[in-house]
Image: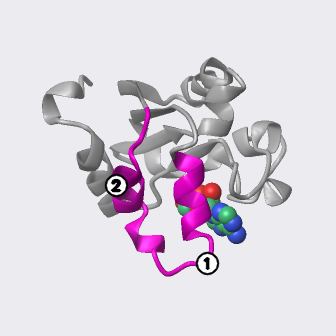
Amino acid sequence: MAIQRTFSIIKPDATKRNLTGKIISKFEDAGLRVIASRRIQMTREQAEGFYAVHKERPFFGELVDFMISGPVVIQVLEGEDAIAKNREVMGATNPENADAGTIRKEFALSVGENSVHGSDAPETAAEEIKFFFKDEEIVG
Ligand code: CMP
């Protein structure tokens, strides 16, 4: 498998509980490298734009409100098969369905407050990275 890049967000429920380092360790232990990182307070416009694909979902308003409820850490992760590997380390979206040892099983509070976001495909990874990072901010 090729070296890939993926986009990750450590969400407000995790930053509030000071879990940033523990979550990054899970990525690094799985062979993923943090090649860009920034802690930000997302604006409503950014959250609505980032999650535009979910605009028609009943939980969209709740999702946007949550994502701007506190700081998030946005990152680019690089590694062998990074997109699938990151999704494996995160576990299922709903922590009730997540495997033991995954980030969401250990840390997530609910399907909404689920501690992390990760890109689901190469095209979305490229779009999501571009949404938040300039090329010169990514140092592989
Ligand atoms: P994420 O990977 O960030 O992409 C979309 C998010 O929507 C997802 O993680 C969940 O946190 C959130 N989500 C999915 N289903 C629900 C739901 N039923 N209620 C609230 N949030 C949801």
Q: Residue at x 55, y 24 (%)?
A: 28
Q: Is mark 1 within 8 Å of ligand 1?
A: yes
SS of the residue at dot 2? helix
Q: Amino acid at mark 2?
A: Glu
Placement of 84 over or under 19, stated as above or below: below
Placement of 117 over or under 18, stated as above or below: below
- Residue nearer the viewer, 90 or 19: 19
Q: The C terminus lies in which quarter of the figure?
A: top left
Q: Confirm whether the magenta stretch covers residue 56.
A: yes
Ligand 1 is found in which quarter of the picture? bottom right
Magenta stretch: dominant SS?
helix
Q: Callout 1 environment at 10 Å: few (<14), some (14 to 19), or many (20+)?
A: few
SS of the residue at dot 1? loop
Q: Residue at x 61, y 18 (%)?
A: 21
Residue to which mark 2 is pinned: 45
Q: Residue furthest bottom?
A: 56
Please provide percent x and percent y for residue 20: 60, 23
Q: Residue furthest left?
A: 136
Q: Confirm whether the magenta stretch covers residue 2.
A: no
Q: Amino acid at mark 1?
A: Pro
- Residue nearer the viewer, 34 or 32: 34
Label for residue 14? none
Residue to which mark 1 is pinned: 58
Q: Residue at x 57, y 30 (%)?
A: 27
Please provide percent x and percent y for residue 92: 70, 57
* Bounds of the magenta segment: 41-67
Rounded to the nearest angstrom, the CA distance separating label 1 from label 2 is 18 Å
Find residue 89 and report its image quarter. Answer: top right
- Residue nearer the viewer, 23 or 114: 114
